[in-house]
Image (cartoon, grey):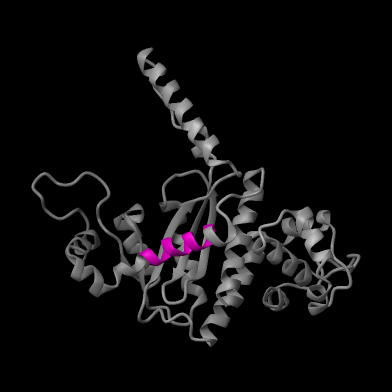
Amino acid sequence: MRAAYELASQSLPNYSCKFSRKDFTLPQLFACLAVKELMKRSYREAEALLADSESWLRDIGMTHAPDHNTLCRAAKLLLTRFRTDKLLDVMAQWAAVARMLKLSSKPLAVDSSLYESHHVSRHYERRCHQTRDRMKAKDRKRGRKTSRSRTVRRLPKLAIGVCSHSHLVLSMWTGTGSGSDHPHFESILFDAWRRVPNRRFKVALDAGYDSEEAHDLARREMGLITLIPPTKGRPRKDGGPPGGHWRGRMKRLLATRESRKRCGYTHRWQSETVHSMMKRNLGSALRGKTAHSRKRDLRLKTITHDLMVF
C-alpha cells in the first residue's frame, strides 16, 4: 500500500479538479485500489477491509476508509490508459535506478493471454462444454455450419512486454477477443522502447507476431533486434526458406535448440511465466461486466503485479 501511494504521488495530481471535495487524494485512492486487487476483493469487501485496518490508512494519511461507490468512481478516473501509462513510466524509472532491467543481457519477452470474463465453477464449465459438443453434433447431422463461440469472442485479452530478468511488465495492451496479435505489436514495442535508457535490445516474440513488416518496423524505426519464429503461413513446397529477408534469417537463426539458446530466444517463456504469476496471485477472472471495465481491471492487475515485484 505504501509503494502504491508513493508511485501514484510521483505520477498523479492530488485532485482531479479544483472543485473536488478533497476528502481523499488521488494517490490515496489508488493505494486503496491496489490493496483491493492484491486481496482479491470486491468494492464492498475492500471497503470493509479498509475500515478494519486503521493502521494501513494512517500510513498514507487517511482518517477513514472510502466507501465502495468512491472506489468505483476512482477506478473509472484513475485506470484510464493515459494515467496507467504514467504509472508505468515512473516504475520503469525506478527499475532503471535499481538496475532491474538488464535488457543488454536478456531480451524483452512479449506475449498475450486471455482472461476469464467471470467466475465459474469447473463443474459448470465442464457441463457447458458437454452441452456445446452435443449441439455441434446435432448441427453437423442437420448440415449446419458451426460458428465460433460467442463467449470466446468476448473474452478480455492482455498483451504485455516483460523484462526477462526481473519479470517486470514494461508495457501492456488491453483488448477483447482472441484475434490476431498484429494490432498491438507496435504499441507494445514502442512503449517499452521509450521507457528504458538502453534502446538497443532484443525482443523475443512467438509466431503470432510473425511478418516481414513487423521485423522492418522494429529494426528500422526503433533499432530493436527481433526474434520471431517464421512459422506463419503456408510453407514452400521445395522446402526453402520463407519469403522476406528477415524471415529467412530467422529460419536459419532459430533452426536448432542450441542456436535459440545462444541468441536468447529461450527467454520468451518468461512472458508466459508472468501471465501465470498474475493469474495465480491475482486471479484469472475479472469482476467487470463491460468491455471497458474489464480493461480497467486488467490495467490494475498489471500495475499491482509490478508493485509486487518491487
> In which quadrant of the rendered image does the N terminus lie?
bottom right
x and y percent of residue 205 in the render?
36, 61
Return the residue found at the far front.
123
State which region is magenta. Answer: 269-279
The part of the image, by quadrant, that contains residue 60 is: bottom right
Return the residue found at the far top.
142
Give 192 or 47, whichever is nearer the viewer.
Answer: 47
Whether residue 199 is visible here, answered yes or no, is yes
Residue visible at 85% across and 58% down? 67
How many numbered badges does the structure rendering display?
0
The part of the image, by quadrant, that contains residue 55 is: bottom right
x and y percent of residue 167 in the render?
47, 71
**257 is higher (above) or lower (below) than 116:** below
x and y percent of residue 273 in the render?
43, 64
**125 is higher (above) or lower (below) than 221:** above
**234 is higher (above) or lower (below) than 111:** above
**284 is higher (above) or lower (below) than 29:** above
Give 56 or 87, whichever is nearer the viewer.
Answer: 56
Give 201 or 155, whichever is nearer the viewer.
Answer: 155
Q: Is residue 219 magenta?
A: no
Task: Tell me the chief SS of the magenta region.
Answer: helix
> In which quadrant of the rendered image does the C terminus lie?
bottom right
User: As drawn, is 305 to the left or to the right of 146?
Assistant: right
User: As drawn, is 79 to the left or to the right of 188?
Assistant: right
Whether residue 187 is visible here, answered yes or no, is no
Residue visible at 23% across and 59% down? 247
User: As drawn, is 32 to the left or to the right of 152?
Assistant: right
